Amino acid sequence: MKTLNITKEELKQLYDRDYPLWVDINLQLLKEKEYELVDWENLLEEIEDMGRSDLKACVSYLAVILEHLYKLDNFKDLAGDEKAGNSWVRSIEDSRDSINVLLNRYPSLKVKLPQELNYAWEEAVSRLRKWLSENDIDPDTYNFPKDCPYTYEEALNKKVK
């Protein structure tokens, strides 16, 4: 298949207008070694985003773990009955399993994820504040720690009950 008659500028515009076509054309250009026509700026951004998507998923799972660990440690009495927290425990276990699947699939994330602990904590605090509001509790009455109160190891291994 011969390269389409398209300028570099038209190709850049396709990125926003017709993403699948943009991908097809860039792939064709790469296969044909027409490197000077490739939309490198957007292509490099896409490759970077691909690498981040699995890390983002891990951070999101980590945030759920931190949120529910914090609830178990600080808000179990707000849930009301003695079975309070069972869903939080299940959520922690499920999130840990999901992280482990991703870490086994993409071992390089084992180095990156611990560095994201405070970002995950920020997300967890946001979720905690929302949860308090949904339960008619003013979240401003709680002073959540600025830094994550759990280590990465605790987040992934602390016993929960």
Image (spheres, rainbow, N blue to C red):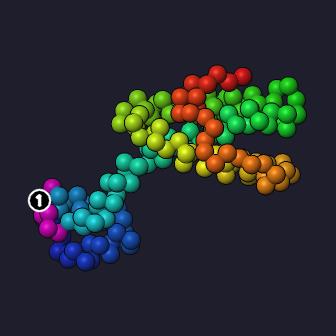
Q: Which residue is mark 1?
A: 33
Quarter holding the N terminus is bottom left
In the depicted structure, whether residue 49 falls above or below residue 55: below
Q: Nearer the viewer, residue 10 or 132?
A: 132
The residue sitting at 47% across, 38% down in the picture is 114
Label 1, residues with CA under 10 Å away: few <14, some 14-19, many ≥20: few
Disc 1 on helix, strand or loop?
loop
Query: Is residue 136 magenta-colored?
Result: no
Residues in magenta? 31-37
136 to the left or right of 22: right
Residue 33 spot, x, y in % from top left: 11, 59
Q: Nearer the viewer, residue 69 or 18?
A: 69
Q: Nearer the viewer, residue 125 or 17?
A: 125
Query: Looking at numbered disc 1 in the image, what kind of residue is underneath it?
Result: Lys
In the depicted structure, whether residue 50 falls above or below residue 1: above
The residue sitting at 74% across, 48% down in the picture is 143
Q: In the rendered image, which quarter is residue 66 located in?
A: top right
The residue sitting at 60% across, 50% down in the picture is 122
In the depicted structure, whether residue 124 falls above or below residue 30: above
